[in-house]
Image (spheres, rainbow, N blue to C red):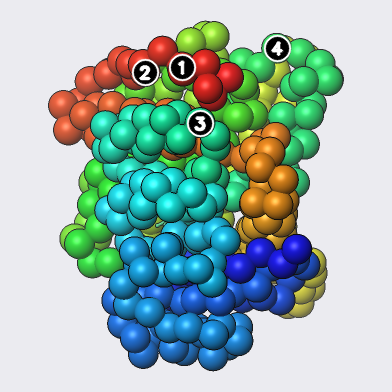
Amino acid sequence: MTIRLAVIGAGIMGCDHARIFAEEIPGATITIVCDASETRARAVADTVGARHVLTDPDAAITSSDVDAVIVASPDFTHAPLSMASIAAGKPVLCEKPLSQKSADCVQVMEAEQAAGRSFVQLGFMRRYDQSYMEMRRALTEGRIGRALMMHNFHRNVATPAADFTGAMAITNSAPHEFDVVRLVLGTDYATISAWQPKRSDAVVAPVFMVLETVDGQVVDIEINNNAAYGYDVRAELVGEKGGIAMNPVAYTRLDQNLCQQVGYDADWRGRYHEAYVRQNRAFVRFVQTGVFPEIGSSAWDGYAAAVVAEAGVKALAEGRKVPVEMMKKPEFYK
Ligand code: ISE
């Protein structure tokens, strides 16, 4: 059966998801593209052959021409649109973060539990990236012994908006690391500390965080939204018997003028293309079978990322180590 999808949000991510589902995922078709701007929605709908263009997300979600929903609108709409999808009984692939407020994530979890089945898969696509999968496997197979530390860099060329802040580096960019490191290490965080060096100009400076896990591991994360030179993500997992590090991802290397050069992507879409395809394929299987994907990110994972981000924002503002305090995990998400 072909799954009919509504894509809500026709910006950079909505456009990318629409293209991936239409061109690379068998068994899925985009029937509706919805955006506050009809022109923007129309442009994406024309590219992927969607039948309808809407500006009202609730009408898109409840449409009889839609089996499941893709939410790629601004961050503050993620939780309410996920709730609307649950109310309509339709599975939703919601871009990260589920919310910047953990209380909103609790509401989504409550709605899902009341509905009696899983509906929400979050777009933490790095879970499907080969490098993190291999790190996780190295640990679970015991090849590098007990995990001790995980180092992470996350660099963007420039912030998406001029008013991007250090707090947003923690609530919008760092949730990728908060989520995927939790998955790789198979643990939760106990504390977070955060610092920001001073830049010579007015743009947002990097945020450097150190987290301790409840199992006594140490994790550091650099979020540098104005790194200038390229989109660059690195990670290294250090265990008691060895380590495993992510290689730079590039198909070629240019040798010239006594130098070797490897290019960088301008943003995450190229670097994580394969991960998005795998994630979106897993979502379609979830819609078809009702079985939540094994490594998919659930509303509980969205809650976990939001709690760490809230503590991180506090740690940065107050210049101190802040405990990460999570509610007891509901049976439903075990
Ligand atoms: C953006 O929202 C993303 O999700 C990207 O993966 C991340 O690199 C970027 O910093 C965020 O703003």
Mark found first going from the N terminus, 1 or 3:
3
Residue 186 seen from this side: yes
Crowd class of label 3 (few under 14; some 14 to 19; many from 20; radius 10 Å)? few
Viewer-nearest of labels 2 and 3? 3
Residue, disc 4: 146
Mark found first going from the N terminus, 2 or 3:
3
Tag 1: amino acid: Lys
Which percent across, then down, holds residue 194? Answer: 31, 30
Residue at position x 50%, y 60% in the image: 69
Crowd class of label 2 (few under 14; some 14 to 19; many from 20; radius 10 Å)? some
Front position in the image: 127 or 121 = 121
Which percent across, then down, holds residue 265? Answer: 59, 68
| Mark 1–mark 2 distance (CA, rounded to whole Å) | 8 Å
Residue at position x 54%, y 72% in the image: 65
Specify whether tag 1 is near ligand 1 (CB below 8 Å): no
Tag 2: amino acid: Met
Mark found first going from the N terminus, 3 or 4:
3
| Mark 2–mark 3 distance (CA, rounded to whole Å) | 22 Å
Crowd class of label 1 (few under 14; some 14 to 19; many from 20; radius 10 Å)? few
Viewer-nearest of labels 1 and 3? 3
Q: Which mark is residue 326?
A: 2
Mark found first going from the N terminus, 4 or 2:
4
Tag 4: amino acid: Arg
Tag 3: amino acid: Gly
Residue, disc 3: 116
Front position in the image: 79 or 128 = 79
